[in-house]
């Protein structure tokens, strides 16, 4: 299935979901959940429509600040307040009536939070997907197909990401590491740098690494502990850990630069012989869907799952 066929199939469905991308999570948290929602919609014959007018990664317009369009977008401002990412614990009656009126007036069947628990269900990972001109696929293979279709940088982003990736001095064959710090400890315990590197060394004798991290102290630690190995990175000495709420307060030009750097790092990781990272970190979860399974590894030895 190519993008043209996806659009034709998507637009043939009678019911509609408007997915609010960039509601409140980090970029890959938002993107990963969008992929799951797209798969759910294909499985259940629901038209997928995007809303990114006020995305938290927005520079000017949202999705198209960085990528080429792949489906219809709506720009109705009411999605900003009414189309929440996660289900509400309690919805007051007046808000229920407002949402019902809005959906009816816009011919919308589902908002993001109404399907959230469905496409994030552990049972959903066991589904198979049948698309035109393809054999039945499991969730990871189906997600990889969608990524190949929609992960298309616009010309400006492509030029910037290409320049950044080419600025890194790496041989053709190397290993990729993603080591998160910052506010990630709020969600899950952080692992030692040595756990990632020792996992990598159990997989390959390659001595060159691309290390993606949000904390330059991790780069320094890796170089100090393993002086016989080479670690290249796009992390800069001023970075001390990603804090999502602090990122949202940055000027648009700085957020834009950080995201270009993130995308360039992702491209380098995706081109590695083996990627080592945790699936509880959203770049790791994303690469677990983008890359062939035999090239993706967790330092804990656990399998990919929906987090």
Image (tube, rainbow, N blue to C red):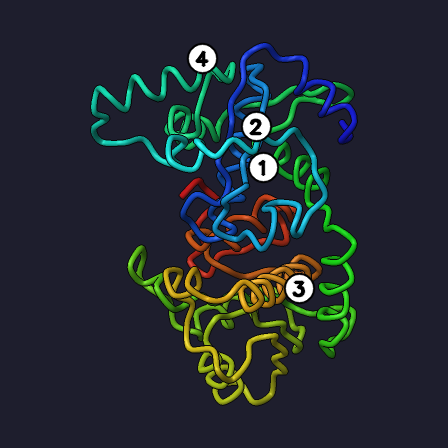
Identified at 66% across, 35% down, the residue is: 146
Q: Which of marks 2 and 1 is in front?
A: 2
- Residue bearing mark 3: 264
Q: Earlier in the sequence, mark 2 or mark 1?
A: 2
Q: Position of residue 205 (x, y in %)?
A: 65, 73
Residue 53's label in the rendered image is none
Identified at 57% across, 72% down, the residue is: 211
- Residue bearing mark 2: 39
Q: Nearer the viewer, mark 4 or mark 2?
A: 4
For the residues labelled 2 and 1, the Cα–Cα distance comes to 10 Å
State the SS at label 2.
helix
Q: Earlier in the sequence, mark 4 or mark 2?
A: 2
Q: Where is residue 128 in the image (x, y as percent from the top left)?
A: 57, 23
Identified at 58% across, 61% down, the residue is: 259
- Residue bearing mark 4: 104
Determine the image quadrant of residue 147.
Answer: top right
Work out whether residue 126 or residue 38 is closer to the camera in this orientation and state it.
38
For the residues labelled 3 and 4, the Cα–Cα distance comes to 42 Å
- Residue bearing mark 1: 140
Q: Position of residue 217 (x, y in %)?
A: 44, 82
211 sits left or right of 150 in the view: left
Q: Is 304 situated above or below 179?
A: above
State the SS at label 4.
helix
Callouts 2 and 1 close, C-beta under 8 Å: no
């Amino acid at each position: 299935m190519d993008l043209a066929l996806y659009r034709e199939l998507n637009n043939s469905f009678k019911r509609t979901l408007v997915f609010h991308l960039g509601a409140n999570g980090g970029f890959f948290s938002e993107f990963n959940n969008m992929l799951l929602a797209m798969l759910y919609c294909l499985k259940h014959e629901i038209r997928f429509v995007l809303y990114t007018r006020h995305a938290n990664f927005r520079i000017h317009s949202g999705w198209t600040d960085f990528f080429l369009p792949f489906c219809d977008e709506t720009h109705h401002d009411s999605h900003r307040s009414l189309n929440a990412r996660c289900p509400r614990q309690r919805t007051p009656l007046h808000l229920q009536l407002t949402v019902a009126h809005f959906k009816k007036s816009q011919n919308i069947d589902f908002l993001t939070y109404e399907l959230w628990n469905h496409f994030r269900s552990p049972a959903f990972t066991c589904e198979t997907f049948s698309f035109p001109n393809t054999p039945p696929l499991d969730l990871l293979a189906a997600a990889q197909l969608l990524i190949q279709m929609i992960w298309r940088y616009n010309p400006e982003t492509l030029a910037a990401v290409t320049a950044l990736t080419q600025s890194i001095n790496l041989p053709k064959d190397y290993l990729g590491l993603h080591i998160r710090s910052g506010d990630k400890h709020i969600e899950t315990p952080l692992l030692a740098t040595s756990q990632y590197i020792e996992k990598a060394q159990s997989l390959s004798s390659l001595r060159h690494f691309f290390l993606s991290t949000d904390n330059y102290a991790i780069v320094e630690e890796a170089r100090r502990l393993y002086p016989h190995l080479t670690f290249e990175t796009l992390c800069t000495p001023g970075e001390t850990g990603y804090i999502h709420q602090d990122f949202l307060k940055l000027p648009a030009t700085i957020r834009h630069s950080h995201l270009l750097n993130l995308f360039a790092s992702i491209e380098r990781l995706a081109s590695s012989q083996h990627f080592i990272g945790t699936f509880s970190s959203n770049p790791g979860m994303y690469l677990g869907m983008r890359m062939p399974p035999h090239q993706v590894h967790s330092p804990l030895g656990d399998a990919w799952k929906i987090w």
